[in-house]
Amino acid sequence: MGRTSNVFARIEPGVKEQAEMVLSQLGIPMSNAVDMFLRQVVIHRGIPFELKLAAERPLFAGDLSKEELNREIAKGLADIENGNVYSEEQVSEEMKRLYNL
């Protein structure tokens, strides 16, 4: 390897630890993984994986007209009446799964 440059990045400790565990199992040092990522950025001329916004953004009451707000409330009430509800425990477990908490 020729000359090198340093890259400094701030990473959440939990994410760093999880990445280190995976990379360790692959036998790849963190610096090599970062180098591979940056090489892919160059090859792809952008981020080497798809970046996109969620299909739907959360609704905010202040963004809705009175009619739209009433429609959303009616949908929520209909869900409750039809039993389409989740317990606090189910929501908590899903949040932990989604955000690796």
Image (cartoon, rainbow, N blue to C red):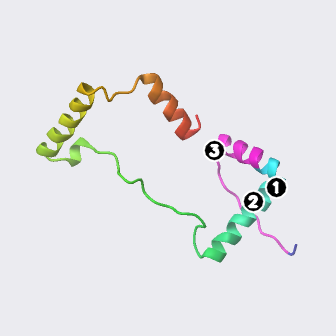
Amino acid type of the residue that numbered disc 3 sits on in the rendered structure: Glu
* Residue on which the image places disc 1: 29
Q: Position of residue 80 (x, y in %)?
A: 26, 27
Amino acid type of the residue that numbered disc 2 sits on in the rendered structure: Ala
Name the residue furthest right: 1
For mark 2, give the secondary structure: helix
Q: Position of residue 79 (x, y in %)?
A: 26, 31
Marks 3 and 1 in Cβ contact (< 8 Å): no
Q: Position of residue 21 (x, y in %)?
A: 76, 44
Marks 1 and 2 in Cβ contact (< 8 Å): yes
Q: Which residues are magenta?
A: 3-22
For mark 1, give the secondary structure: loop
Name the residue furthest left: 67
The one of 61 and 85 positioned closer to us in this rendering: 85
Residue 47: quarter of image: bottom right
Which numbered disc, 3 or 2, marks the residue closer to the eye? Answer: 2
Tell whether 53 sits left or right of 25.
Answer: left
* Residue on which the image places disc 3: 12
